[in-house]
Amino acid sequence: MNGEVTCSHILQKHLGSRNPNDSYRKKPITRTEDEALVNIKNIREKVMSEGISSFGKYASEFSECSSAGDKGNLGSFGKGQMQKAFEDVAFSLKVGEVSEIVKTDSGLHIILRTK
């Protein structure tokens, strides 16, 4: 299945992110990358301890991507449609697996492969 994957994600932006003031939350991003890393680690720990069924709840509550409005759902995408680091991890995950923290120009993510 090399064609497409379907994923959800949780994004934490920081001052060094691409478009740091363009957040779904409509609040200016003032945190450092280290502070964003602490946040995303804590969110990942909660998801891992509560199970992947909690992923959407935390995406809705904390993600700074517009996909938060749909519980982090990014839908399906193929190769070449996402930033390379994100894509590489998304395609390497098994269905139902949550990634480690992924750094892209957009910020810090955790990814859940759903299909």
Image: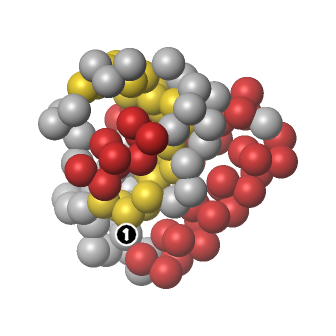
In this figure, which colouring scheme has been used for the structure? secondary structure
Q: Is residue 41 left or right of residue 30?
A: right
The picture places residue 85, in percent across and down from the top left corner, at: 31, 54
The 10 Å Cα crowd at callout 1, few under 14, some 14 to 19, many 20 or more, is many
Quarter holding the N terminus is top left
The picture places residue 62, in percent across and down from the top left corner, at: 56, 48
Q: Residue at x 27, y 74 (%)?
A: 16
Q: Amino acid at mark 1?
A: His
> In this orientation, does residue 25 appear?
no
Q: Is residue 26 left or right of residue 113?
A: left
Q: Residue tagged by mark 1?
A: 14
Quick one: 40 or 98, which is closer to the camera?
98
The picture places residue 92, in percent across and down from the top left corner, at: 45, 41
Q: Residue at x 55, y 48 (%)?
A: 99
Quick one: 72 or 93, which is closer to the camera?
93
Q: Residue at x 60, y 72 (%)?
A: 38
Q: Is residue 51 above or below residue 115?
A: below
- The quarter of the displayed image where residue 20 is located: bottom left
- The quarter of the displayed image where residue 58 is located: top right
Quick one: 48 or 65, which is closer to the camera?
48
Q: Is residue 34 left or right of residue 1?
A: right
